[in-house]
Amino acid sequence: MLNGGYFDIGTPFYGAIYEMQHLTIPASLQKNIEYAFYNSGHMVHTHEDALKEMHSKVADFIRRTSPGGVHRGCLGAMTQGRLRL
């Protein structure tokens, strides 16, 4: 999962997409890459609304892609909604 801000001058918006699309990996793996962009700059976590949105998307990604379900500990708490921002 690639996460980024739309207003990022350190790693420009399209630069990250370009890099991911030019990885030398099979197309079958390329389709597993997910992209999420937020109304923020490079440090998404400093914009509270963007942070909350990113948290939800990353938790969903972890839930959907973790073999055998959600893991214990902080990761489990995050994906089950027990860890609050």
Image (cartoon, rainbow, N blue to C red):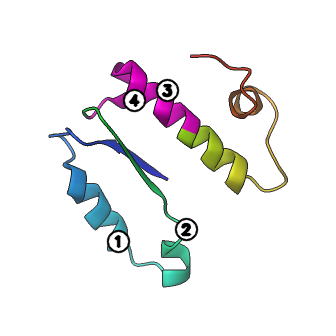
Q: Quadrant of residue 37?
A: top left
Mark 4: few, some, or many residues within 10 Å (few <14, many ≥20)?
many
Q: Residue at x 78, y 56 (%)?
A: 67
| Disc nearer the start of the sequence (4/2) | 2
Quadrant hosting residue 44: top left
Q: CA distance from mark 3 to mark 2?
A: 23 Å
Q: Position of residue 81 (x, y in %)?
A: 71, 26
Q: Disc 1 designates what residue?
A: 21
**Principal SS element in the magenta part?**
helix
Q: Is the residue under label 4 in contact with that under label 3 (CB below 8 Å)?
A: yes
Picture disc at residue 32: 2
Q: Nearer the viewer, residue 60 or 16?
A: 60
Residue 26 image position (x, y, % from top left)? 49, 83
Q: Nearer the viewer's eye, disc 3 or disc 2?
A: 3
| Percent position of residue 54, x then y | 48, 35
Residue beneath disc 3:
52
Report helix, strand or loop for mark 4. Answer: helix
Asked if the residues shown at circle 4 and circle 2 are in contact, with their CB atoms under 8 angstroms apart, the answer is: no
Q: Position of residue 79 (x, y in %)?
A: 70, 34
Residue located 23% across and 50% down the image: 13
**Dot in front, 4 or 2:** 4
**Rendered position, 40 above or below 24:** above
The residues tagged by marks 3 and 1 sit, at their Cα atoms, a distance apart of 27 Å
Sequence order check, earlier mark of 4 and 1: 1
Residue position marked by numbered label 4 in the rendering: 50
Inspect the magenta stretch and tell me whether residue 41 lies in it. Answer: no
Q: Nearer the viewer, residue 60 or 77?
A: 60
Q: Amino acid at mark 1?
A: Gln
Q: Which residues are magenta?
A: 42-56
Mark nearer the N terminus (3 vs 1): 1
Q: Secondary structure at mark 2?
A: loop
